[in-house]
Image (spheres, rainbow, N blue to C red):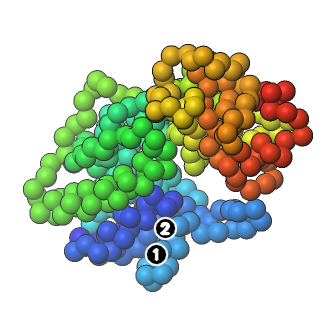
Amino acid sequence: MRLVFAGTPEAALPTLRALLASRHTVAAVVTRPDAPAGRGRRMEPSPVAVLADEFGITTIKPIRPNEPWFQAELRAIAPDCCPVTAYGALLPQSALDIPRYGWVNLHFSVLPAWRGAAPVQHAVLRGDDITGATTFQIVKALDAGPVFGTLTEPIRPTDTSGDLLERLAIAGADLLVRTLDAIEDGTVSAVEQPTEGISFAPKLTPADAHVDWKLPAHLIDRQIRACTPDPGAWTDFEAARLKLYPVLPYLPGGAAFVPPDAGPNATALAPGELRVERGAVYVGTGSRPVRLGDVQPQGKRRMPAADWARGLRAAPAAIRLG
């Protein structure tokens, strides 16, 4: 089939590579416009735009996909189908009607669970054991179209959303190519989604990533992993933000692994209270303490928490994170 692929972030790169290696032809790529990035906030093309340019593929960057010039260009290309992975904009019906096989989306959950912009983050945040990916026909309603295929993927106890998304992006790219093959061969029919089990996954904001140390350790563990790498978990420290990377459970005296949702232990710390012990930094929660992993003070580099603690102006016992 003649394809126009729509995608924007790094998570869409495995899909574009898989399409380029498939029996189909990628005639063009649709992606979000260049955006400011990095410390200098220079305008940079999306990761998908960069990869498309490496292969000499035409790149189209509408601000909104309802713009007449964009839809006219899409009609001129005359794609049979438009596969999508993490494009980042809602498509109007006038655009959906252009390719004869429509737009086929790769979504990183097993629909109808976790419809929306951040399905992987919400699966980690909720503590799901299993997630997956779905290919479906895009319709006007959000992630509500009929399903072509699914796959499942276990969520590991230490997975960040970045870890999980990386695996799903690779496995999902293969699922999307197989879906397109089956559409062309006429061997698949889309099946309507169940009306039960619907949940939504809106984009997580920096406010969602602010750690409340009064929560139990297992919820803090999930929150930090869900917000890694984006939007980045954080806590208040000396009137500034301290960025947090995944934490570990408290291991008194080098004991065996203790799950972060285990009950209180004898070495109690008040929520947000710090203790340095054997080169490690522990912080109290609403249940048992957790060991800080890497941290990143505002305006500084990422570093192990023990290195950060050595530079504190006050004794750790006098400090509260909040």
Q: Amino acid at mark 2?
A: Val
Q: Is residue 33 above or below residue 262?
A: below
Q: Quadrant of residue 95?
A: bottom left
Q: What distance separates the C-alpha of mark 2 from that of mark 1? A: 6 Å
* Left or right, 126 with reference to 287: left
Q: Secondary structure at mark 1?
A: helix
Q: Residues within 10 Å of mark 2 (few under 14, many from 20)?
A: many
x and y, in percent, of residue 225 in the image: 53, 40
Identify the image quadrant of the C terminus. top right
x and y, in percent, of residue 137 in the image: 29, 48
Q: Is residue 222 above or below residue 1?
A: above
The residue located at (56%, 16%) in the rendering is 264
Residue 266 visible here:
yes
Q: Amino acid at mark 1?
A: Ala
* Residue beneath disc 2: 48
The residue located at (31%, 25%) in the rendering is 197
x and y, in percent, of residue 303 in the image: 70, 52
* Left or right, 284 with reference to 169: right
The residue located at (37%, 47%) in the rendering is 107
x and y, in percent, of residue 29 in the image: 43, 69
The residue located at (22%, 37%) in the rendering is 192
Count of number-bearing discs: 2
* Left or right, 238 with reference to 92: right
- Residue at the right extreme? 313
Q: Nearer the viewer, residue 112 or 145?
A: 112
* Residue beneath disc 1: 52
- Kindly indicate whether the residue at mark 1 contacts the one at mark 2 (C-beta within 8 angstroms): yes
Checking the image for residue 313, the label placed there is: none
- Residue at the front extreme? 253
Q: Nearer the viewer, residue 181 or 121?
A: 121
